[in-house]
Amino acid sequence: MKLKSIFLSLIALGFVLSAVSCGESGDKTIKNEKLHPFLLSGVYTLGGYGGPSTLFSYVEQYATAQPGSSSFLKQMSEAYEEYFVFPYGTDSKREYQNALEDWWGIENKEEFMETQEELLTNYHQASYEKVRKALDENGGASADLTAIDLNKYGLDEEDALADLRFVRDNYGKFSKAGIKAWDIVRYVNNVNFAHAAGYLNDSEAMEMAKKALTEAQKYYDSWTDYFNDYNLGRGFWGGDNSAEFDRIVSGILDKENVYNIYNYMGIK
């Protein structure tokens, strides 16, 4: 099942009013409490629309006021709310139920809730922390992997060397949060899938998305650190399509594009 093919056919434009304000520095910012938590999973949402440049071009068609003006920011907020909040639609429930079952082994709401709780508490982040501790105590970026006592750190011999090697080779690239963003991004994307699958109503899904935002704000001060950690987490997990995800993250972090919502709404 292609993510892009599903919800490109389900987009229905209908804008909702949201707030725009001016920051202390005079820079224009957007405040939209409904939209804000869904920016956390933007790497998947943007990918589904064909990538950042494609969605930015869609937004440009609706944000027609002078860039930087209050009217422009209002249009930006309205457009992104429509594109990002519950982007998958609800008229193909079976497809999304199948996707959750195929990708996560989730067959009902109870299993979904259990998986979500793990994602926010001890999913891949817990594995990363074990590996990071082993490296921190054995030479860091210069660690001799064959000299590390895997049992001491509770590391599985079958997977440990690959995980240790990846973290060692990228030792200075992680933020202090590790790969927390990898789990949070997928948490919010799963919320969108569960909503489309009929496992969550609007209020339940919104509550879970806001919970994820609160969690992300404990660890991150910027989208740059957040999405860089996401990409590193994907590598730690062993994900493929690295070039494609690098392209999407690069688009999200593009400071020059005036149609990029991430330039108007920070993680905090």
Image (cartoon, grey):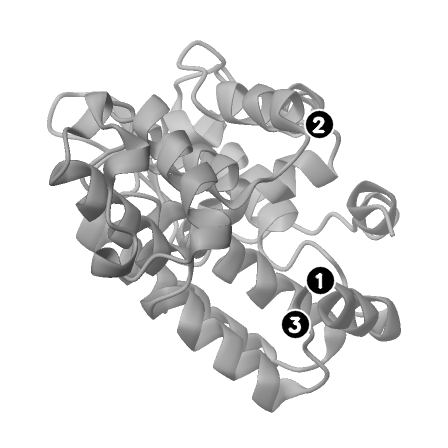
- Can the viewer see residue 234 in this picture? yes
Q: Position of residue 33 (x, y in %)?
A: 37, 56
- Residue indicated by mark 3: 195
Element type where label 3 sits in the image: helix
Camera-nearest label, 1 or 2: 1
- Seen at 49% across and 49% down, the residue is 159
Classed neighbour count for the residue bearing mark 2: other residues with Cα under 10 Å, few (<14), some (14–19), many (≥20): some
Alpha carbon separation for disc pair 3 and 1: 16 Å
Residue 42 or 98: which is nearer the viewer? 98
Q: Which amino acid is tagged 1?
A: Trp
Q: Which amino acid is tagged 3?
A: His
Dividing the picture into quadrants, the one containing residue 228 is top left
- Seen at 57% across and 40% down, the residue is 238
Q: Is residue 265 left or right of residue 96?
A: left
- Seen at 86% across and 67% down, the residue is 95
Element type where label 2 sits in the image: helix
Q: Position of residue 150 (x, y in %)?
A: 30, 52
Q: Position of residue 30 (x, y in %)?
A: 35, 38
Question: Which quarter shows the C terminus?
Answer: top left
Q: Is residue 71 left or right of residue 98?
A: left
- Residue indicated by mark 1: 103
Alpha carbon separation for disc pair 2 and 3: 24 Å
Q: Earlier in the sequence, mark 2 or mark 3?
A: 2
Camera-nearest label, 2 or 3: 3
Dividing the picture into quadrants, the one containing residue 174 is top left
- Residue indicated by mark 2: 58
Residue furthest toward the top? 256
Q: Earlier in the sequence, mark 3 or mark 1?
A: 1
In this picture, is 257 found above or below 245? above
